[in-house]
Amino acid sequence: MTINMGPQHPSTHGVLRLVLTIEGETVIKAVPDIGFLHTGIEKTAEVKSYHQALVLTDRMDYLAPLNNNLGYSLAVERLLGIDDEINDKIKYTRVILAELQRIASHLVWLGTSALDLGAQSVFLYCFREREMILDIFELISGVRMMTSYICPGGLQAELPKGFEAKVREFLKAFPPRLQEYHDLLSNNQLWLERTRNIGILTQEDALAYGASGPTLRGSGVVWDIRKVFPYSGYEKFDFDIPVGSTGDVYDRYMVRMLEMEESRKIIEQALEGLPEGPYRVQNKKVTPPPKWQITGSMEALIHHFKLFTEGYRPPQGEVFVRTEAPKGELGFYMVSDGGPKPYRMHVRGASFANLQVLPRMVEGTFLSDVVAAIGSIDIVLGEVDR
């Protein structure tokens, strides 16, 4: 028989409809059906200035908005030709925030995926640690999730006093908490039975379907944009790329668990080497003047007025920038026609590409294994239905 799983199914992690053909408990065919959310973010960006369009990126993968901000900002900066003006203070701060966001995203994945398979307490523990990270985001921006803190030209504001202490507090508390998750799940017999040899994705299929991130690395492919095409100073940090061997749900679980530890190492290194400097490029055509200048300088007031009414105008051209987001490879393709608004913005979202491989994972398995496979891909429908 043919049945619908979703689009409002609690285990599809968003409005995803799966058309499943089953024989008994075995899935014969699976067809992912998207388009129920369809935010239209890419089209909306074309009628916004470059600065206004930034806030739209927070709403794609809404569990990793700072990673979206970073990819977008790098693309706009390359369009403007100011990417070599970004100082180390901005780069290191961006890395710290991006890796904190990666951990926060993985914590939501771990808690919800464990809950899908019956491990209720892990869900509560994961949100306990995520709250610490959101407190840091609130400290720097006043907002817990959609911060828009990383922006073209640098950062929205100077890092406040207490930022470093708050991050170090999290770094100290996190390792024993991560060990708690391992103690609860990694050798738990029920967890092993629900994840081992379930939802297998071969290396060949992962590459052929364009999978990326932990979904690709879980199949044993050593590929991380931070290593292959370093950006924002990632080449200066020492970290490993965890990979799996079987390509099953357990491998994808373990890759993300190990990635959280690697992210912690990167944050520590960036925090130790965090230099002094301005939080924005010193380019009056791109970034607004300090507030104190506006009251005493007509030139500063004009720059401020023109930036927020007209926006800046990158020269004609096109760029493609790829970054390693928590879900996988996040690419921004930007086209400028010389005007103050993007002529075209297209996003290569990892969740969209990774969702293609779901039928390869679940066809021939039991219906209950579909839930485990979806969770192991870690999709967010805001990134799929852009």
Image (cartoon, rainbow, N blue to C red):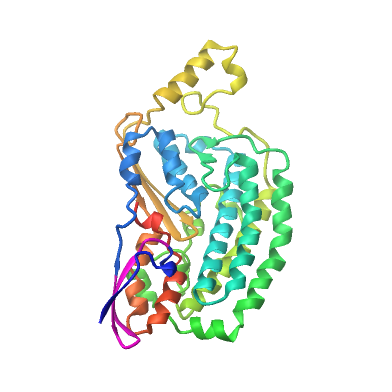
Query: In the picture, residue 293 is in which quadrant?
Result: top right
Query: In the picture, residue 143 is in which quadrant?
Result: top right
Residue at 47% in and 52% down: 62
Q: Nearer the viewer, residue 136 or 238?
A: 136
Task: Give the prevailing secondary structure in the magenta stretch.
Answer: strand
Q: Percent from the top left, x then y, of residue 361?
A: 37, 77
Residue at 71% in and 46% down: 164
The reply, left or right, for residue 372 in relation to residue 2 is: right
Q: In the picture shown, does residue 38 fall above or below 261?
A: above
Q: Percent from the top left, x then y, of residue 89?
A: 62, 40
For the question of whether residue 243 can be seen, the reply is no
Residue at 54% in and 48% down: 145
For the question of whether residue 150 can be seen, the reply is yes
Q: Percent from the top left, x then y, of residue 231?
A: 50, 49
Q: How many dots with numbers?
A: 0
Q: In the picture shown, does residue 53 fall above or below 303?
A: below
Residue extent of the magenta highlight: 14-31
Residue at 54% in and 43% down: 147
> Which quarter of the image is occupied by the N terminus?
bottom left
